[in-house]
Image: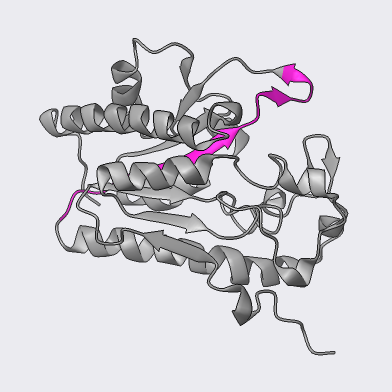
Amino acid sequence: MQEAVLIDPSEGPIYEVRRPGGASDVVLVCEHASRTLPKALGDLGLDDAALKSHIAWDIGAAGVAERLSDLLDAPLISHRFSRLAYDCNRPPDSADAYPARSEVYEIPGNAGLDAQDRSRRAEALYVPFHRAIDDLVDTRLGQGRNVVLVTVHSFTPVYFGRPRDGHLGILHDDDQRLADAMLDAAAKLAHVSRNYPYGPQDGVTHTLKRHGLTRQIPNVMLEIRNDLISDASGQAAWAGRIAELLTVSLERLKTEGGRRHA
């Protein structure tokens, strides 16, 4: 039997690039921008409420990332398909890249995937997305430009029945230069924390490691509570705050010689 194509050409590209020639040092990435599933996967056995919930995408993250892109004149690469099909902040050998369960939700369409199923999804959804990030970052570095990697995410205010009162998490892995600068700049803001509500021990820093640590460029992952950015006004407000934090922090890194070359 001939293997079905996972992404039909009519569904368009798997990622979108905004402001590819942006003047900013910042390169923005939004791995969980969309809740759209490939048609070939149907609804994965989930009802409409689950497919609109935080398990399918980072609610509000795309809106914040797009506004940040415009405010900073920064390129943005966003994925156009749901993390339920493939979580692009996980490597192909991670079970969490193809979650069979997310928080309280079972995902029947991801249960019992074999090696061929996983490879098919990784080749269609992970490989071209991360290759596009590689190409954009390496092109800029090849031009002698500074590059700073910033990924944009959101988190649910209630997780496994427990409320989360934080507003913004500033996450890092081994390289904490940019996170330190942003946390200092955010000292007067309430509810801003380091490695919240997750940290590198939770396996959430794959994109930072693959594209930032390997090139020794400053990098940070942002997590915003999704009820704060569920509408356009919240997205605009938080994009403005984060743009200010990044601007101040990047000036500090330049003053301190914070750039490391690959």
Residue 224 location (% of width, % of height):
51, 30
Outermost residue on the bottom side: it is 1
Apparent side of residue 176 relative to residue 37 in the rendered image (left or right): left
Rendered-image quadrant of the N terminus: bottom right
Does the magenta-highlighted stretch encompass residue 254? no
Outermost residue on the left side: it is 255
- The image quarter containing residue 225 is top right
Apparent side of residue 157 relative to residue 28 in the rendered image (left or right): right
* Magenta-tinted stretch: 145-162
Residue 217: tell me if it is visible. Answer: no
At x 40%, y 62%, the residue is 17
Apparent side of residue 237 relative to residue 25 in the rendered image (left or right): right
At x 46%, y 63%, the residue is 16
Specify the principal SS of the magenta part. Answer: strand
Residue 96 versus residue 203 in the image, above or below: below
Relative depth, front residue between 117 and 153: 153
Apparent side of residue 123 relative to residue 171 in the rendered image (left or right): right
